[in-house]
Every structure is written in structure tokens, then in C-alpha cells.
Image (cartoon, rainbow, N blue to C red):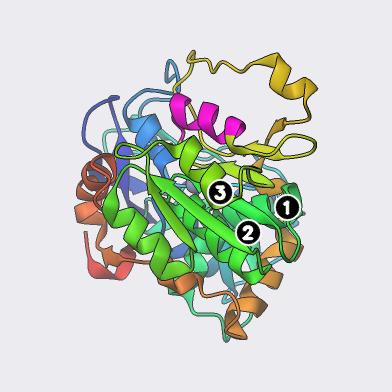
Amino acid sequence: MKTIAAVLCETSKELQIEELEIPELKPGQVLVNVIYSGACHSQLNEIKGLKGEDKFLPHVLGHEGSGIVEAIGRGVQKVKPGDRVVLTWIKGVGADTGSAVYKRKNGSIVNSGAISTFMTKAVISENRLVKIPDEMPLREAALLGCAVPTGAGVIINTARLSKGDTVAIFGIGGIGSSALLAAKLKQASLIIAVDIFDNKLDEALRLGATHAINAEKEDVLSKILKITDKRGVDYAIECAGKRESMESAFKSVRYQGGLCVIAGNLPQGERISIDPFDLIKGRRIIGTWGGESSIDKDILFYAAEYLSGRFEFDLLISDECGLKDINKIFKEMEQGKTNRVLINMERGY
Ligand SMILES: [Zn+2]
């Protein structure tokens, strides 16, 4: 059986659309007919080789999506053929089978992780799938694999933001905007969006931010102090993956208990600098692992909140395209042009 995949053959080069042979399912593996895939900054970093030496070339990418189960390997209990599922990089219950290896026509191999979504059919480890209710549309469900659980999880599970708290969100991409929507769901009193692109700040205001700051045109820290009556915010969430932004996110939280959460990725080897005196005065800084999601429970919670109309993460989708246009998504992502374009496998390759 064949699949069409976007393959990274060499870092800093465009992904190649190739036909690959699907391997036989091992115990615990599931063959999914991928319908939608998201694309994140994390894959852009992989393409550019920013995650360090890539020992797995050539390989397929993509770690969030949605689709329909086509076949299951021995021992799989979580899903059955015909089930509608979210594909997620965040581990949940079920077998952890590691990677799948595909073959080209000439016999050479193409690697993949326990999950890949830049392909029409994918072999996925059971623990990277979550069955969703029939009413949940697959288009919106694709965001439940990474952007929503990471962004919303940072607000709900990591920061544990409560009603009336104040928050600044640095970097309004997929994760930043889902964090923003979750802050709105949790009724934060101030939601300050920080970015360097005006179009993303306009988007943040549309999604419910109370204030927007362009970090290239304004002094972020003095503006946040002004908005918060010199106090600083209760929470700062860094999703831009930039050194300066991480440093100012930390400085923007209040003394005596303010918390900065780093959700963005820096290129490997880059460091940030903080003043330990700020720690002594009670500013805190932590990281996050996928928004501390318990993915099987959280995805169903977010789907239910979406279906009830309280958590409008469909607003995050700006457009969709076919697998053939995948390189354009990353080019535009690099330029900060687009918010979140989904790849719809039914649109051709
Ligand atoms: Zn992601």
C-alpha cells in the first residue's frame, strides 16, 4: 500500500513530495487515513536544521493532525477502523511503538517518528491517537494535536490561571493564540499580546486580547507596567521562541509570585540571561512540556468546550491548502505572514 508524503531530504531545502510504500503494521501501530495536518514552528526549525544535527534524514515531519483509522496492528485497543481520531505528538495511553520506516520505489528508506502527519496515510503509535466524538469536525480537530493542548495547557495546567488574573502572551502564533483563547475561557482580567508583526497583533485583538504591544515599535516592559499600574503581570507566556522575548517575558511578571512560562523553542545552543536578583524578589520562571497535557482527557475537554461554543479555536485557522503547497506554508511562516494554515490531504498533492 502506498502513501504520498512530504519528505525532508536535506536540511534548509524544500520538502519533496514522494510516493512511499507503507510498512506492515507492527503490534501497537495504527494506520490512519490523514485528512488534516497542522504545521508548526517546530517543523520549520527541523527543516532549517536548527534542532542540531539531523541523524534521521531523509524523514517525514508533522506532529498534529486528524483523520480516520484504516487498520490496526495486534494488541491495539484504544481505536478501531472507522474511528475519527486526533493525531498528536503528546503521549497518551496505549502502546508506545517508536518509529515507522517507509520505503521508496528504489528500496531506499525514509524515516518517521512515532507520529508523522505530512502524508496521506500514516503509521502511528497507538499512544499518539485520541478518539474524538462524531460531532467534532476533523478540520478543527487537527489543532487538538499540538497548538491547542500546548497553548491552552500552558494556561490551564501549567500556569493554572484563575478568573481575574492578568497575563501577557509573547508571540502570537498557533500556541500563543490558543493560550490567548484559553485565557479568555478562564476569564483573565487583562490579556496583553506582544509580537513584532502588526497583523498578528490585530489578530490577537480579534481573538480577545485587551491590549497589544508591538515589541519593535514600543518599549514592552514600560508599557506592561503602565497597563498593570506598575505591578507587572501575574503570568507571562513566551511562545515566540526568541531570546529577547524570553528575557522580557520574565521581567514582565510581578515580584512576589509572578510566573513566566517558556513555551517557545530557541535554536539549539542559544542561551538566555536573567538577573538572579529577580528570582530572589519572587519572579519565577519554568518551562512546559506540551502544556502538561493529559492528552486523552484534555482533548475531550477542549472538544466539548469547542462544541459548546465557549472555546472558539476554529478562529485560529486562517486558511487551508493541499500537500503540494506545503513549502509555501513554511516560507510564509518564516515571514510571519500567516497565522495557521492547515494541510487538507483531500486537496491533492
Ligand atoms: Zn507543534
Q: Amino acid at mark 3?
A: Ala
Q: Residues within 10 Å of mark 3 (few under 14, many from 20)?
A: many
Front one among 291 and 283: 283
**Does 68 sit above or below residue 92?**
below
Where's residue 322, x and y in %?
Answer: 24, 62
Crowd around label 2: few <14 · some 14–19 · many ≥20 (10 Å) = many
| Residue 127 appears in view | yes
* 222 sits left or right of 256 in the view: left
Number of labelled discs?
3
Q: Amino acid under label 2?
A: Leu
Q: Which residue corresponds to the image point at 30% horizontal and 24% vertical from the top-left?
A: 11
Residue 92 - label: 1
For mark 3, what is the residue?
168
Magenta span contains residue 243: yes
Is the C-beta separation of discs 2 and 1 under 8 Å? yes
SS for tag 1? loop
As measured in the structure, the alpha-carbon distance from the residue carrying label 2 to the one carrying label 1 is 8 Å
Assess whether mark 2 and mark 3 are in contact (beta carbons under 8 angstroms). Answer: no
Marks 3 and 2, how far apart at CA: 32 Å
SS for dot 2: strand
Q: Quadrant of the N terminus?
A: bottom left
Q: Name the residue tied to disc 2.
A: 129
